[in-house]
Amino acid sequence: MRLEAEMDKKIYFVSSGSYVPKNIMKNDDLKKYIETSDEWIYTRTGIKERRIADKDEAASDLAYEASKIILDRAKVFSEEIELIVMATITPDTCCPSGANWLEAKLDAVNAVSFDVTAACTGFLFALSVAMQYLRTGAFKNALVVASEVMSRVVNWYDRDTCILWGDGAGGCFLSVEDRFEGAPILKEVFIHTDGKNGQNLLMPGGGSKTTPISHESVDKKLHYLKMIHASDSMRVAVRRFSESCFQVMEYFNLKAEDISLVVPHQANYRIIKNVAKKINIPLEKFHLTIEKYGNSSSSSMAIALDEAIGEGRVKKGDNIILTGFGGGLTWGSALIQW
């Protein structure tokens, strides 16, 4: 049980930032790999295009670009960062972590850094981890970044999955310092997992089960992300997305009309549309980026949130729900009060 002092501590959402690679891959560009069309992909997913990292861009590079924006908006120097939590399933290397590489690039000499792995819900898990450190007083501030180079783990000849993924990074700066009083408040983060059904979204290779990497494991395409029982996963996603939104509203005694904006993980337009209907919040209140960025896993929610802020979709007093579902299985939600 959390102490009352910890619960009452304000976690300021000081700033946000995002970065997407310049390379655009349109749906028709996928014809070089698979039999498909722009109409076929768009009607099933809501995706028109996605961003693809340059061959020399790693997850920490995308995170670095997003972090520079975050810190500049927060008016914070890199040496002031005490904690860096990076959400990713596509780190530069397994060791060191993606966050370690990011720490070095930022020259954040006073920071502790590590990765959080929770697939598409990673940004929420990273927020939750950072929030607990700030609440306990272990740190006064944290840089939270989600960064993915999904194009490196996509089988471009698998029509069920290659149409979905894109690359990008986004995040925020959190603090408990009084100098940020008046900034939006990260009120709470709720996270959940279901390891029993984790095989439904699986990257079989690369871990201790299939190492060392061999010609056989590569030939069997074990190092690509696989989606098992896609239709079942969509139904589960709608249910978990909705449950997590209801959890936020019930915890804070909010009604659907009290929610100003929902920023979901950009999984699939059909999923988001069904979630909106299920929780009785108009689809117009959902900020969508899936058409132009696709599904960039853990970073999609952070990118969408930053874009919504930049477009002026939030104002003082607004209640913003973040919600996500991903491999693990993982799901969760958060409330930001503007």
Image (spheres, grey):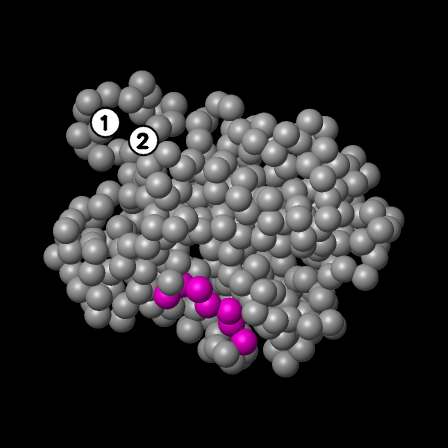
Residue 121 visible from this viewpoint: no
* Residue 226 x %, y %: 29, 44
The residue shown at (37%, 44%) is 53
Name the side, left or right, on which 115 lies relative to 248: left
Quarter holding the C terminus? bottom right
Q: Nearer the viewer, residue 75 or 293?
A: 75
Magenta region: 285-291
x 51%, y 24%: residue:
96
Indicate whether residue 160 is drawn in magenta. Answer: no
Find disc 1 in the rendering and name its residue: 217
Q: Position of residue 265 (x, y in %)?
A: 48, 59
User: Which labelled disc corresponds to residue 11?
Assistant: none
From this viewpoint, which residue is outermost toward the top?
212
> Are the two marked residues, 1 and 2, in contact with CB atoms closer than 8 angstroms?
yes
Whether the magenta-drawn stretch holds residue 286 is answered as: yes
State the SS at label 2. loop
Residue at 51% x, 72% y: name it: 286
The answer to whether 68 is drawn above or below residue 47 in the figure is: above
Mark 1 or 2, nearer chain start? 2
Which residue bears the numbered disc 2?
Answer: 205
**Does residue 154 appear left or right of residue 324 in this picture?**
left
